[in-house]
Amino acid sequence: MTHPSTQAIIVTGASSGIGRHLTIRLAERGHPVYATARKETDMESLSKIENVIPLLVDVRNAEQVKAASEKVSQSGHGLYGLVNNAGVGELGMLSTWTDEEMLNIFNVNVFGPHRMTNAFLQLLTESKGRIVNIGSQGGMLASKYYGPYIMTKHALEAYTAILHDELEPYGVHVSVVQPGGIISDIGGNMMAGTIAHFKRAQPPFKEEADMVLQSFAEESEPNPNEPKSATNRIPSSPEIVWEAVQDALFADKPKMRYLVGTRWEGNRVIHALIAKLLDENDNPKHNYSRDELIELLDQHLAKRMG
Ligand SMILES: NC(=O)c1ccc[n+]([C@@H]2O[C@H](COP(=O)([O-])OP(=O)(O)OC[C@H]3O[C@@H](n4cnc5c(N)ncnc54)[C@H](OP(=O)(O)O)[C@@H]3O)[C@@H](O)[C@H]2O)c1
């Protein structure tokens, strides 16, 4: 078995939340972990974790990405894995987003993974390594107020699927992990921007936006003592993201998609996908009958079971 100390992995956005959790778990497993952050204080805190090498990277900054890839190349240890985790996600009605803000969120959540992938591709093909993109269940859903965030996560889905097909012949496996709500710092980190969006709403959205702002003011923290059930919406631990990332990085046959979260969240995605499928089937020029759809489903299930 390959020893973890020979499999270096880079994780973007390791300063907080999911990225920090993944960094700690990988380091505990014995991997050299290049953990990227944007602030000196975060670099310092990451450097205190055994096996962790902090790198200064804002994924929008091509120079910093290039410098990081040169540093990793020069280390001589190669690179086995890239985890594209860094992401931002302010909320707000689409009409409250400026072009500049739209470009910025795509720059971080979509072009960031692309920039990192390109910069580290040679090392990853040499090691026949793995790329794991942290997407979201939002990559398959569309909910109001989550507009640009969900648009970027849809784009990351397509990016993953295409990259998966392009790199498979060269021995590099690409996956996307699609979490539901996860306990992290994302809500707090994005709150000021989110509030600014709702405050900027113009008619006819003004009244609705005021109600959303009011609900933020009244919102209480989820009760951690409330028993977890299939239906509740209490966010899950980042550990479930780690379990999926671990499989995507180290399983002999990793999956391309890992949907993670509560049962309620998972079911919501399946329902949305079935509704979408039926929308696409709703055209007499190409539609399948009910029996044909069920037959197709059986064929696909049989193919999966091998
Ligand atoms: N939490 C959830 O419920 C949830 C659900 C589905 C998917 N996700 C995804 O999980 C990933 C991690 O989110 P999180 O929940 O852990 O949120 P978080 O605690 O806010 O972490 C986001 C990380 O991304 C970094 N980042 C932001 N902009 C960056 C940039 N331009 N360049 C480099 N790094 C940047 C942040 O660094 P700074 O500290 O420097 O800002 C931070 O380390 C994101 O892709 C998010 O979309 C989260």
Image (cartoon, helix red, strand yellow):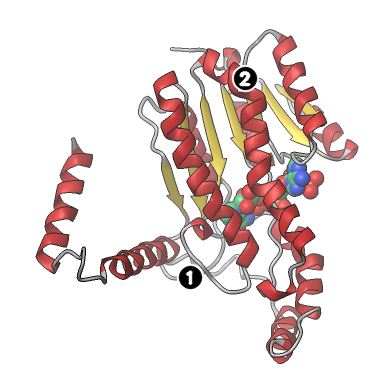
Q: Residue furthest top?
A: 76
Q: Nearer the viewer, residue 254 or 206?
A: 206
Which residue: 66% across, 32% down?
Answer: 116
Q: Measuring 53% from the left and 31% from the top, which residue is drawn there?
A: 131
How crowded pointer 1 is (Cα within 10 Å; few <14, some 14-19, many 20+) is rated as: few
Identified at 63% across, 39% down, the residue is: 113
Identify the residue shown where x is 53% and y is 14%. Answer: 127
Q: Quadrant of the C terminus?
A: top left
Q: Is residue 4 visible?
A: yes
Badge 2 or badge 1: first in the primary sequence: 2
Q: Amino acid type of disc 1?
A: Asn
Q: Give percent across and percent down for residue 56.
A: 82, 32
| Residue 77 image offset from top left, x and y in percent | 65, 10
Separation of residues labelled 2 and 1 (CA atoms): 38 Å
Query: Label for residue 8?
Result: 2
In the rendered structure, find residue 232 and report the number of the disc placed on it: 1
